[in-house]
Amino acid sequence: MGFGVLIVRFRVVQIPIQHRHGTGWKLGLVFSLVGLATVLISTKQYFIVRRQIDENTYEPSDGLIFLFSLAVGLLGMGVIFFIFAAAVSSRSFVIPN
C-alpha cells in the first residue's frame, strides 16, 4: 500500500503548468488494492495455519507464496514502467535534461 501512495505522490514532481490526466493514480490504486488484499488474505491464512498447527495437520502452501511473489513482481514492473514513462515526458523532473 505504501508503493501505491508513493506512485500517486510522483505526480507532485511534474510541472503543474498544464494539468494532464496520467495513469499514475491508476497504478497507485492498484498497489493500494493489492496491499489491502494481501492484508486480508494473510490474516485469513494466519488463522487457518494456526488451527492446522493446533490440530497437527499443518502442510505448507506453496500456492499463496507463488501468487504473492507474482503479484509483487508484476507491480514492480509497473513501477519501473511508470518511472521510465515519466522520465521520457518533457514535463517531468524525474530525470532532468
Image: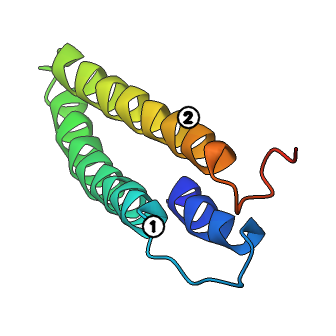
Classed neighbour count for the residue bearing mark 2: other residues with Cα under 10 Å, few (<14), some (14–19), many (≥20): few
Classed neighbour count for the residue bearing mark 1: other residues with Cα under 10 Å, few (<14), some (14–19), many (≥20): few
* Residue 86 appears in the rendering: yes
Q: Position of residue 42 (x, y in %)?
A: 31, 46
Secondary element at tag 2: helix
Asked whether 26 or 67 is in front, the reply is 26
Q: Position of residue 52 (x, y in %)?
A: 16, 31
In percent of the image, x 33 and y 50: which residue is there? 38
Residue 74 is tagged as none
Residue 22 is tagged as 1
The quadrant holding residue 84 is top right
- Of pointers 1 and 2, the one earlier in the residue sequence: 1
Q: Is residue 46 above or below residue 21?
A: above
In percent of the image, x 32 and y 34: which residue is there? 71
Mark 1 or mark 2: which is in front? 1
Residue 69 placement, left or right of 1: left
Q: Is residue 3 above or below residue 68?
A: below
Three-letter amino acid code of the residue under disc 2 = Ile
Q: Quadrant of the C terminus?
A: top right
Residue 77 placement, left or right of 44: right
- For label 2, the residue is 80
The quadrant holding residue 85 is top right
In percent of the image, x 17 and y 41: which residue is there? 48
In percent of the image, x 50 and y 37: which residue is there? 81
* Residue 60 appears in the rendering: no
Residue 21 placement, left or right of 30: right
Asked whether 76 or 93 is in front, the reply is 93
Secondary element at tag 1: loop
Asked whether 42 or 49 is in front, the reply is 42
Task: Calculate the distance from the C-alpha at mark 1 to the C-alpha at mark 2.
Answer: 15 Å
Three-letter amino acid code of the residue under disc 1 = Gly
